[in-house]
Each structure stands twice: as C-alpha cells, then as structure tokens.
Image: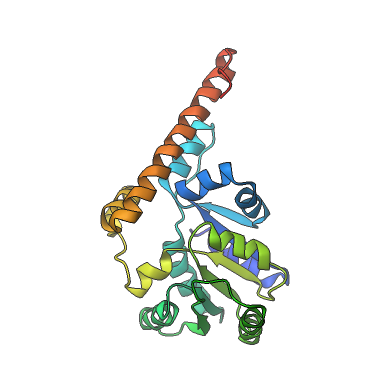
C-alpha cells in the first residue's frame, strides 16, 4: 500500500489519462472467457490483486505478490493520503443516492476530504444527451480522481471506453467499495480481511444471489488454478499436460 500511493500520485499528475482495475476471481474468470473484458484489463495502467485467488494463482505461476490490495481499502487510503495534496474526488456509481451517502460518510471519516461531485447513473443505458451532461459535470468538477462503482466487469468496460475521452487524470474501479463505505452493505471485519477470508464473508452475508454467483466463479477460478499448476508441473518434468 505504501508503494502504491506515489504511483497513483504520479498517474494523477502526469497530464495523461489512466485507469486502475482491481482483479478478483469473478473478474479473472470473465477475462479468461470474454476478450472484451481481457482487453479492458490489458489496457489499464495498473491491475491490482483484489482477491486471495490472485495471490494464490501468482504463486502457482512461480511469481509472488506481496499482498492483496482491495478496492475498498485503497479507496480509504488514497482519500486520506490525498488530503495533504489537495486531491479532488468524484464518486460515480452505485444505486440511487449511494454515491451521495458515500461522500457524506467519507467526509465524516476524513474531514478535509475534497469531494468534487457525485453521480449515480440509472440502471438503464443512458441517452447521448445524458452521457454528454455527465461528461460536462465530471470535467467541470476539476477532479483528480474519479472513483467508479458500477460492479465488475461493467466498470472496467466503462473505464476502458471513457479513458482519454473523459478529461480526468485517474479513474479507479472499486465496485463494492461504494456499498461498504456508504453503509449499504457491511464490510468484513479487519481480522477476516487480514486472514484472507473476505470472499467467504461476502458469500455468507451477501444474500442468495451473491452466494450462488461467487460459488460458481470461485469454482471456475479453482479449476483455472489447478490447470495452471498442472502446466507448471508439466513444464518442469517435460511431460505433456493433456491440452491444459
């Protein structure tokens, strides 16, 4: 996290346009199956390991990630970090009213936080006129960071489509962070997150739809990791890996 803060500062100050993604099992499986999602991740300036499966998968590939960097944790840390630098934040996403509640709660937690604006888009495709109005609103806010909470992979596709077209230096897709920090959903306790069990906590507390979706994608991710481990083992032994 300490190393991440100056990297985000640099992106926000270079005069270019960047977006950051947070990858977990669901998004990783979608990227493996959907070229459009994979392209959105490949075009990002930075992809961070949100889920414990990313850390495990990296180890099976012979790499090592120091730790998970989740969207909710990075949102809080960068909002605190940016106060001394005068960073301006815009919150885009969530159900109706969620972005407003999020901003209010964050300003309570971080009194000097500069909130440049909020907007919760409708659950339908916006018209060209609505898109143009939102674009003008965001750009007029002179935001340094646009936090996008549309859920994966919608937010990654949205950022990939808008990077460079929307004059904001840095966008970060943080998904469930909007619900957690607005109080709409309960964030896992610190000890659960530290133990790497946040995925299980979300499954058990998110309702039936979340449980079924996460169980499905976690199983698919596990199968992908098994295949990855098998390929790595086969490459070491020189044995064929049966098409995996």
Residue occupying the point 65% across, 80% down: 135
Q: Position of residue 146 (x, y in %)?
A: 57, 73
Say which quadrant the C terminus sits in: top right
Q: Is residue 105 above or below residue 21?
A: below
Give above or below for 176 relative to 57.
Answer: below
Where 27 sits versus 184, above or below?
above
Q: Position of residue 4 (x, y in %)?
A: 54, 59
* Left or right for 169, reference 67: right
Residue 204 x, y percent position in the rendering? 26, 52
**Left/right of residue 138 with respect to residue 229 in the rendered view:** right
Relative horizontal placement of residue 189, taking residue 134 as reference (left or right): left
Closer to the camera in the image, 234 or 108 = 234
Against 119, is 202 above or below?
Answer: above
Residue 193 visible in the displayed image: no
Question: Which residue is pictured at 54% across the width and 32% down the height?
Answer: 61
29 or 171, nearer to the observer: 29
- Report x, y in % for residue 111: 40, 84
Q: Is residue 36 left or right of residue 122?
A: right
Residue 158 in sight from this viewpoint: yes
């Amino acid at each position: 996290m300490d190393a991440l803060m100056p990297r985000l500062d640099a992106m926000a100050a270079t005069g270019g346009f960047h977006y950051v993604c947070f990858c977990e099992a669901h998004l990783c499986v979608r990227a493996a199956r959907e070229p459009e999602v994979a392209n959105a991740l490949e075009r990002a300036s930075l992809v961070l390991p949100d889920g414990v499966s990313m850390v495990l998968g990296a180890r099976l590939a012979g790499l090592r990630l120091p730790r998970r960097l989740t969207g909710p944790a990075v949102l809080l840390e960068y909002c605190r970090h940016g106060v001394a630098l005068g960073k301006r934040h815009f919150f885009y996403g969530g159900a109706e009213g969620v972005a407003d509640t999020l901003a209010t709660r964050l300003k309570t937690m971080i009194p000097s936080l500069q909130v440049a604006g909020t907007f919760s888009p409708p659950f339908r495709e916006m018209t060209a006129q609505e898109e143009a109005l939102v674009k003008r609103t965001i750009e007029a806010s002179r935001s340094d960071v646009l936090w996008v909470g549309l859920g994966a992979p919608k937010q990654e596709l949205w950022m990939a489509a808008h990077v460079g077209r929307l004059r904001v230096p840095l966008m970060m897709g943080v998904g469930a962070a909007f619900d957690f920090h607005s109080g709409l959903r309960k964030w896992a306790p610190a000890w659960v997150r530290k133990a790497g069990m946040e995925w299980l906590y979300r499954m058990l507390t998110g309702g039936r739809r979340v449980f079924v979706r996460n169980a499905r994608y976690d199983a698919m991710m596990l199968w992908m990791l098994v295949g990855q481990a098998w390929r790595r083992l086969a490459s070491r032994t020189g044995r064929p890996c049966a098409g995996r």
